[in-house]
Image (cartoon, grey):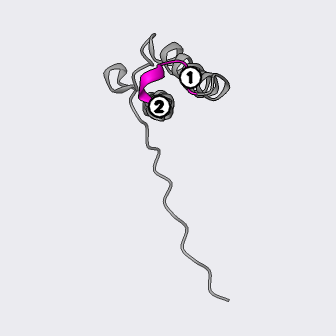
Amino acid sequence: MAVSKKRQNKNHTIEHDPAASPAQNPSWLVPTAVSLLVIGPAWIVVYYIAAANYPIPGIGNWNMVIGFGFLAAAMVLLTRWK
């Protein structure tokens, strides 16, 4: 039976460059994202419970867009989370 050739084991060392290490999260990122994740659903729930009288009475269903906008902004921020 044929035997495959063995790979030559080269000892590769990777030098650690502190400038090339991944950056840490900004300190405002997680609190802002969590706040937006709380504000968005709260905005939508208040809109439904108040029968469209709150949070902003004159804009009607655009309150839903605002609530989902908060959620979308949180998701965009969370894509930067490392």
Q: Is residue 5 left or right of residue 28?
A: right
Picture coordinates of residue 38, whole percent (x, y): 60, 20
Q: Is residue 5 magenta?
A: no
47 or 12: nearer the viewer: 47
Q: Is residue 31 left or right of residue 24?
A: right
Residue 79 is labelled as none
Label 1 crowd bin: few (<14), some (14–19), many (20+), radius 10 Å: many
Amino acid carrying label 1: it is Trp
Which element is circle 1 on? helix
Picture coordinates of residue 14, whole percent (x, y): 41, 35
Q: What residue appears at the point 39 percent right and 22 percent down from the top-left corner?
A: 23
Looking at the picture, does residue 25 appear above or below residue 82? above
**Magenta span: chief secondary structure:** loop
Picture coordinates of residue 44, whole percent (x, y): 58, 28
Gap in angstroms between the C-alphas marked 1 and 2: 13 Å
Q: Quadrant of residue 79?
A: top left
Q: Which residue is mark 1?
A: 43
Extreme residue toward the top, this view: 27
Picture coordinates of residue 70, whole percent (x, y): 47, 27
Extreme residue toward the bottom, this view: 1
Amino acid carrying label 2: it is Gly
Q: What residue appears at the point 46 percent right and 17 percent down from the top-left corner?
A: 29
Q: Which residue is mark 2?
A: 60
Q: Is residue 59 magenta?
A: yes
3 or 21: nearer the viewer: 21
In the image, which residues are magenta? 52-60
Asked whether the beta carbons under mark 1 and mark 2 sit within 8 Å of each other, the answer is no
Q: What residue appears at the point 38 percent right and 30 percent down from the top-left corner?
A: 15
- Which one is closest to the eye, mark 1 or mark 2? 2
Which element is circle 2 on? loop
* Between discs 1 and 2, the one toward the N terminus: 1
* Location of the N terminus (image quadrant): bottom right
